[in-house]
C-alpha cells in the first residue's frame, strides 16, 4: 500500500526549508551589504 501523504509532507517540508533558507540568506546578505555600505563610505 503506497502512501502519497508521506511524499506530500516531504515536499511541503522541503518547500518550507527552501523558503526559510532563502529568507535567512537574503537577510544576511542585506545586513552584510548595509554594513559594507557604511564601512566604505
Image: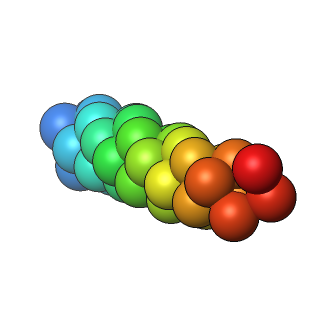
Residue at x 62%, y 54% (from the top left corner)? 38
**Horizontally, is 14 left or right of 10 in the view?**
right
* Residue toward you, 21 or 36: 36
**Horizontally, is 15 left or right of 32 in the view?**
left
Residue 12: percent from the left, percent from the top? Answer: 29, 37
Residue at x 69%, y 64% (from the top left corner)? 39
Residue 24: percent from the left, percent from the top? Answer: 41, 54
Residue 32: percent from the left, percent from the top? Answer: 61, 60
Q: Which coloring applies here?
A: rainbow
Which picture quadrant has residue 16?
Answer: top left
Residue at x 44%, y 48% (from the top left corner)? 27
Task: Please tell me whether residue 28 is drawn above or below residue 22 in the rendered image.
Answer: below
Residue at x 35%, y 47% (from the top left corner)? 20
Q: How many marks?
A: 0
**Horizontally, is 22 left or right of 38 in the view?**
left
Q: Residue furthest right?
A: 40
* Residue toward you, 15 or 28: 28
Residue 27 seen in this snapshot: yes
Residue 7 seen in this snapshot: no
Amino acid at each position: 500500500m503506497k502512501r502519497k501523504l508521506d511524499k506530500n509532507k516531504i515536499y511541503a517540508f522541503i518547500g518550507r526549508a527552501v523558503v526559510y533558507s532563502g529568507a535567512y540568506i537574503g537577510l544576511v546578505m542585506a545586513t552584510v551589504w548595509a554594513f559594507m555600505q557604511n564601512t566604505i563610505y
